[in-house]
Image (cartoon, helix red, strand yellow):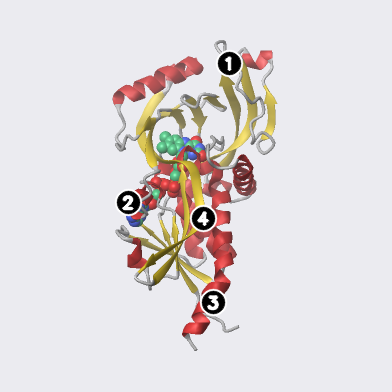
Amino acid sequence: MMSMERIRVAVIGGGLVGLSTALCITESLPQCSVTVISESWSPYTTGDVAAGCLIPHTYPDTSLQQQKEWFKETFDYLFKIANSSEAGEAGIYLLSGWQIFKSAPKETYPFWWQTVLGFHVMNEVELAKFPSYTFGQAFTTIKCQASRYLPWMEKRFKGNGGYLETRKVNNVWDLYGTYNVVVNCSGLGSRDLFHDQSIYPVKGQVVEVNAPWIKHFIRDGDGNTYIYPGISHVTLGGTRQKDDWSCLPNAQASKGILDRCCQLEPSLHDASVIQEKAGLRPTRSSLRVEKDILIKDEKQLLVIHNYGHGGGGFSFHWGTAKTATKILQELIPSLQNAYAKSKL
Ligand SMILES: Cc1cc2nc3c(=O)[nH]c(=O)nc-3n(C[C@H](O)[C@H](O)[C@H](O)COP(=O)(O)OP(=O)(O)OC[C@H]3O[C@@H](n4cnc5c(N)ncnc54)[C@H](O)[C@@H]3O)c2cc1C
């Protein structure tokens, strides 16, 4: 077979999902030349607002087996980084703590219990810390500090020969001819760019505080209140407002977060507020990771979608990046054949 010049890949979106997908492609498929095109970058992406803790929520229309695999791939990948000399620069570290419930959840053992470390149902002595809760799960997971992790990925991607371009893609067909394949990691941008009306924002607000004595995470199992200690601050959350497109934090929501977190961990009364932040979780009932062929005027544009991570981007991003990369790898022979034919 004739060899081809490098396959030109455009990744739309420079958030957590776009950068991890672009990095994964450059690490696995050296025959591809990859450019990430994005309107915004860290510190102005959704991941920069997030606490970045690996505790999965579930996507109702994605199979649990698939979610289990993506979570494990992500956990194992980050676990290696956490145990390497890169951990500090990448902002990846292990974090232990408790997820607590006012009444026992349907599943004592969630699908991810064997992936995190040391998962056990809390005993009475442990639960005594949380008098209004009757059930709890203790485990060690991983936390990513986005302000370090996103620049770390960007640096590695550029080190692998990748390119970054800052601009908005108004129409995906503008990329036709310049690129052989488009990888869509535009999150909420997919609503306009790919006419996907099933993706919507769920606004989330957090308050970052200075409380260096907090060493464990605490998460109410309903997902609404959480305390996640980080490298330079503790992230307190949260809120969930469906279809709210505003990224502005709101004083009343911050007060609610502080009140609820102080109830969970009374020592936070002494914490000073550093900043309040809000972001939009790009939410869908299922994560979309699949091939798509767009057709216009007898022209074909190959697209690989990877978006809709909602409140679980950190928990699943490396797994979905690997699947998107595998889809691309499977397309390479047909791209090479098409190239060979065009040279006949
Ligand atoms: C308050 C809060 C707390 C969270 N906590 C956690 C947590 O603890 N654990 C967890 O796993 N997840 C958490 N998340 C979710 C996680 O942050 C997201 O799932 C993840 O960041 C989504 O990443 P993304 O790259 O898909 O989207 P984004 O970060 O939104 O990136 C999309 C990118 O695409 C670009 N773009 C869009 N359209 C276009 C276009 N037309 N042309 C060019 N560029 C375009 C944008 O500029 C942006 O850079 C949280 C989220 C929030 C808001």
| Residue 303: image tag | none
**Callout 3, which amino acid?**
Gln
Up/down of 234 relative to 83, above or below: above
**Element type at mark 2:** helix
The CB of the residue at mark 2 lies under 8 Å from ligand 1: yes
Nearest to the eye among marks 2 and 1: give it. 2
Residue 39 can be seen in this image = no
Residue 96 can be seen in this image = yes
Q: Check disc 2 and report the residue beneath it.
A: 192
Q: Check disc 4 and report the residue beneath it.
A: 290
**Callout 2, which amino acid?**
Asp
> Which numbered disc, 2 or 1, marks the residue that appears first in the sequence?
1
> Which numbered disc, 4 or 2, marks the residue that appears first in the sequence?
2
**Element type at mark 1:** loop
Q: Check disc 1 and report the residue beneath it.
A: 103
> Which residue ends up furthest to the top in the rendered image?
131
**Callout 1, which amino acid?**
Ser
> Which numbered disc, 3 or 4, marks the residue that appears first in the sequence?
4
Q: CA distance from mark 4 to mark 1?
A: 38 Å
Q: CA distance from mark 2 to mark 1?
A: 41 Å
- Rendering quarter of residue 238: top left
Q: Considering depth in this image, is 158 or 222 the residue closer to the camera?
A: 222
> Which numbered disc, 4 or 1, marks the residue that appears first in the sequence?
1
The answer to whether the residues at label 4 and label 1 have Cβ atoms under 8 Å apart is: no
- Rendering quarter of residue 36: bottom left
The answer to whether the residues at label 3 and label 4 have Cβ atoms under 8 Å apart is: no
Residue name at image x 54 percent, y 24 percent:
221
Q: Check disc 3 and report the residue beneath it.
A: 336
Apparent side of residue 173 relative to residue 97 in the rendered image (left or right): left
- Rendering quarter of residue 113: top right
